Image: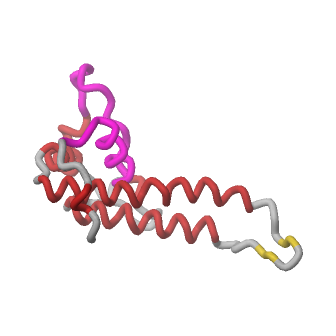
């Protein structure tokens, strides 16, 4: 994707890492101070943490480009609920599949981030007909 050259190459912030975990479909890992950082006990979790801490400068830019695409897609899903109460208004008709269409686009970009990082989609990105044991 073009346009990533102007994005920061600095280390990911804790907030960005939290968002990446969430977008990849993984649950919160809790505080390191607890001594029970669960991601250490699961290969995909640990691999993701290692990758986030060891990305090359161009990779950091690409990850930030993915984040810049995902934030508005996520917000648009929430905004779609504003039209759920209207089925018809004069000539206007709501798109009955707007929320599912937006969720599909959002999940597509989440899976693309998983693919770029080489991390399998987390539990939140699994559909009900398949499960991966990590």
Place of residue 128 in the rendered image (x, y in percent of width and height, measured from the top left) = 47, 63
The quarter in which the N terminus is drawn is bottom left
128 up-or-down from 75: above or below: below
In this rendering, position of residue 54 left or right of residue 89: left
Quadrant assignment, res 108: bottom left
Q: Residue furthest front?
A: 6
Which residue is rendered at x = 80% and y = 76% of the image? Answer: 92
Place of residue 134 in the rendered image (x, y in percent of width and height, measured from the top left) = 25, 52
Which residue is rendered at x = 26% and y = 60% of the image? Answer: 120
Quadrant assignment, res 67: bottom left
Q: How many marks?
A: 0
Q: Nearer the viewer, residue 9 or 109?
A: 9
In this rendering, position of residue 4 left or right of residue 105: left
Q: Residue furthest bottom?
A: 91
Place of residue 80 in the rendered image (x, y in percent of width and height, measured from the top left) = 65, 60
Which residue is rendered at x = 49% and y = 60% of the image? Answer: 73
In this rendering, position of residue 81 left or right of residue 120: right
Which residue is rendered at x = 69% and y = 74% of the image? Answer: 95
Place of residue 74 in the rendered image (x, y in percent of width and height, measured from the top left) = 50, 55
Q: Give the colour scheme of this rendering.
A: secondary structure
Question: What are the residue bounds of the magenta stretch?
Answer: 11-37
Q: Is residue 53 magenta?
A: no
């Amino acid at each position: 994707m073009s346009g990533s050259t102007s994005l920061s190459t600095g280390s990911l912030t804790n907030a960005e890492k939290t968002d990446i975990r969430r977008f990849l479909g993984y649950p919160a890992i809790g505080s390191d101070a607890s001594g029970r950082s669960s991601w250490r006990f699961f290969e995909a979790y640990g691999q993701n943490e290692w990758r986030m801490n060891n990305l090359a400068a161009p990779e950091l830019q690409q990850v930030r480009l993915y984040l810049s695409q995902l934030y508005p897609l996520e917000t648009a899903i929430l905004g779609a609920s504003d039209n759920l109460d209207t089925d018809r208004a004069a000539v206007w008709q709501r798109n009955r599949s707007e929320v599912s269409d937006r969720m599909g686009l959002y999940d597509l970009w989440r899976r693309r981030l998983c693919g770029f990082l080489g991390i399998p989609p987390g539990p939140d990105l699994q559909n009900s007909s398949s499960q991966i044991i990590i």
